Image (cartoon, coloured by chain):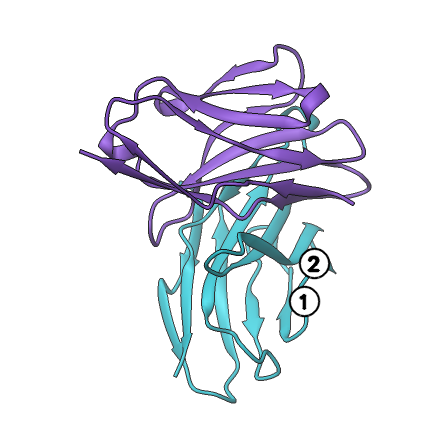
Chain colours: A cyan, B purple
Amino acid sequence: DGGITQSPKYLFRKEGQNVTLSCEQNLNHDAMYWYRQDPGQGLRLIYYSQIVNDFQKGDIAEGYSVSREKKESFPLTVTSAQKNPTAFYLCATMNRDKRSDTQYFGPGTRLTVL
Amino acid sequence: AQSVTQPDIHITVSEGASLELRCNYSYGATPYLFWYVQSPGQGLQLLLKYFSGDTLVQGIKGFEAEFKRSQSSFNLRKPSVHWSDAAEYFCAVGGYSGTYKYIFGTGTRLKVLA
């Protein structure tokens, strides 16, 4: 964290609803990432964006959507098509300078489907 | 295929004892290697990273890791564990192969006995 903000910290969703998780950064980093974390499975990449107005699917993109209209923001929408959305979601950023290929993480959002 | 293996899901050590967490990777290009730590309900904090040069790298909180190319390993060590080190530890490998993406291990949860 320290420059990466995720909100809300906790989010509850009813089945069939879409919800949007916010990720904002003031680090001036080009690249942003969304990961999903489940117990015992580590981090799995959902979507990533290397520049504004461009993003690519990660390993588990089905049921999720993103946008990258501003450098500072990379919101993630969990749609009703995501069958098991309850998880901890982490946003990360990276400066694409080759001397600093390090991802920095936000504090996370815990999503629970009721 | 690119992968990261952390063979120990749980490790328990006594406070003051030494610690070694194992990480093995498979990566086609020259890897960038990372260790992160996560406290419950929090984001990931970077402990240390290896890009090139000296194969023994020092990190924060008294941790170090050694890159052994012949063994495809990047094990994390600490000579004397403190109770506050109890957390989950993730190894990751990354680099540029058209895009900047990381692959994370499934994590090792460390318990420290008083």
Vertical placement of B114 versus A47: above or below? above
Query: Can you give x and y, in whole percent of width and height, for residue B4 in the image?
Result: 64, 41
Q: In percent of the image, x 63 and y 33: which residue is there?
A: B24
Residue under pointer 1:
A61
Is residue A59 toward the left or the right of residue B1 in the image?
left
Query: Can you give x and y, in whole percent of width and height, for residue B102 in the image?
Result: 65, 43
Query: Identity of the amino acid at label 2?
Result: Gly
Q: In percent of the image, x 48 and y 26: which residue is there?
A: B76
Mark 1 and mark 2 residues within 8 Å of each other at the beta carbon: yes
Q: Real-space Cα distance between discs 1 and 2? A: 6 Å
Which quarter of the rendered picture does the C terminus of chain A lie within? bottom left
Q: Which residue lies furthest to the top in this view?
A: B54
**Quadrant of residue B56 within the rendered picture:** top right
Vertical placement of B1 versus A112: above or below? above
**Picture disc at residue A58:** 2
Asked if badges 1 and 2 are on one and the same chain, I answer yes
**Quadrant of residue A30 within the rendered picture:** top right
Query: Identity of the amino acid at label 1?
Result: Ala
Query: Can you give x and y, in whole percent of width and height, for residue A4 in the image?
Result: 45, 47
- Is residue B31 visible to us here? yes
Chain label for disc 1:
A
Front position in the image: B59 or A11: B59
Q: In percent of the image, x 46 and y 46: which residue is there?
A: B9
Chain label for disc 2:
A
Q: Which residue lies furthest to the bottom in this view?
A: A16
Query: What crowding class fits label 1: few (fewer than 14 Cα within 10 Å), some (14-19), or many (20 or more)?
Result: some
Is residue B2 toward the left or the right of residue B42 in the image?
right
Is residue B34 toward the left or the right of residue B10 in the image?
right
Which quarter of the rendered picture does the N terminus of chain A lie within? top left
- Is residue A51 visible to us here? no
SS at circle 2 = loop
Q: In percent of the image, x 62 and y 27: which residue is there?
A: B73
